Image (cartoon, rainbow, N blue to C red):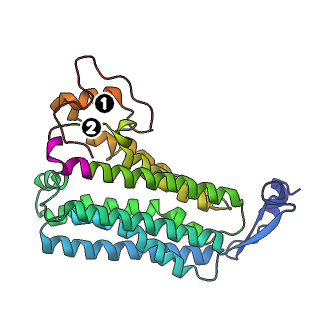
Amino acid sequence: MTTVSSAWATLPPAGSPLAIPISGTVAGPAAQLVGWDGGAFGRTLLLTALTVVVVLVVTFAVALRVGKQAVIDVTWGLGFVAVAATAFVSSAGHGDGLHRWPALALTALWGLRLATHIWSRSRGKGEDPRYAAMLARAEGNPNAYALVHIYLPQGLVMWFVSLPVQMAMFVEGGVRWVVWLGVLVWAVGLFFEAVGDLQLTRFRGDASNRGRVLDTGLWRYTRHPNYFGDACVWTGVFLVAASAWPGVLTILSPAVMVWNLYAGTGKKLLEKDIGDRRPAYADYVRRTSGFFPWPPKPAAPAQEPTGKPTAGQD
């Protein structure tokens, strides 16, 4: 059995491809060595960063043409697809199919679905109220303000969160069942995102629901099925990369995404004052889990389960 000390002893000098041992007690009968080309991975990081810049520059140009910065919400999913495709091409000759193809496919399916959904939801509408409020606070040129306060943060987050995707293009061997666990967690996440979005779209499309709270379907068990789904998606992608060393080192990428969804610009920001403005939603908050799916509490005695009045769900 390979020990920790003997494993590190196999590492070659800096600047040469790394031979990373995987213990046979985890992955198979005997420890095996897999190649790791740090130089090629570094070049891929630079190329994907350039890809993010190009995607955001094109998005900014389109936003100026159509007159709304909300275009970047459509680009959010497409940007990850572009990063995954760039990493896949750049890493040709490295890694193995067990990691490369799932990383590309899972990211592409998630990103294309999300972009299509947001484009359909926002088509024909004006500026998103969130961006309108931000631009109203701008001192000086609002377009320059948008670049610094909207595009730059989203670009940095996009590149950082996608690190497991990029890493998965280079890793080899590892623990096979962890890859499939990642695919399963990703599938659960995509289900919550897609079904939650579909249920909310249908709910809003029915005029009789105007002013009501959606508390059926997945929305009965979590106030944010799409946010929970997004967290699962990126945890699943991380597991694909983490199934082989050094993929586990990208743990901060899904952690940043989950934190952002739960306590950053996701759930916390959306619900900041909605309970004060909409009493029915306040009761929905009392009854329903805020993130992780969980059976709801009973409705207040004097409150109908559907409650009134709000359409302010994400």
Image coordinates of residue 107 in percent, x first then y, are 47, 66
Residue drawn at point x = 35 percent, y = 62 percent: 114
Q: Quadrant of residue 53?
A: bottom left
Magenta: predominant secondary structure element? helix
Image coordinates of residue 66 in percent, x first then y, are 13, 71
Residue 205 drawn in magenta: yes
**Residue 251 visible to the viewer:** no
Between 113 and 89, the one lying in front of the other is 113
**For the N terminus, which image quadrant?**
bottom right
Between 279 and 27, the one lying in front of the other is 279
Which residue in the structure is indicated by mark 2?
A: 271
In the rendered structure, are the residues bearing label 2 and label 1 in contact, judged by CB atoms less than 8 Å apart? yes
Residue drawn at point x = 26 percent, y = 42 percent: 270
* Left or right, 174 with reference to 40: right
Under mark 1, the amino acid is Val
Image coordinates of residue 229 in percent, x first then y, are 43, 50
Give the mark nearest the N terminus, 2 or 1: 2
Secondary structure of residue under mark 1:
helix
Residue 178 drawn in magenta: no
Secondary structure of residue under mark 2:
loop
Q: Dot 1, how many residues are within 10 Å of its Cα: few (below 14), some (14-19), or many (20+)?
A: some
Residue drawn at point x = 69 percent, y = 69 percent: 172
Which residue in the structure is indicated by mark 1?
A: 285
Q: Which segment is the magenta one?
A: 202-211
Under mark 2, the amino acid is Glu
The alpha-carbon separation of the residues under discs 2 and 1 comes to 9 Å
**Residue 241 visible to the viewer:** yes
* Left or right, 104 with reference to 112: right
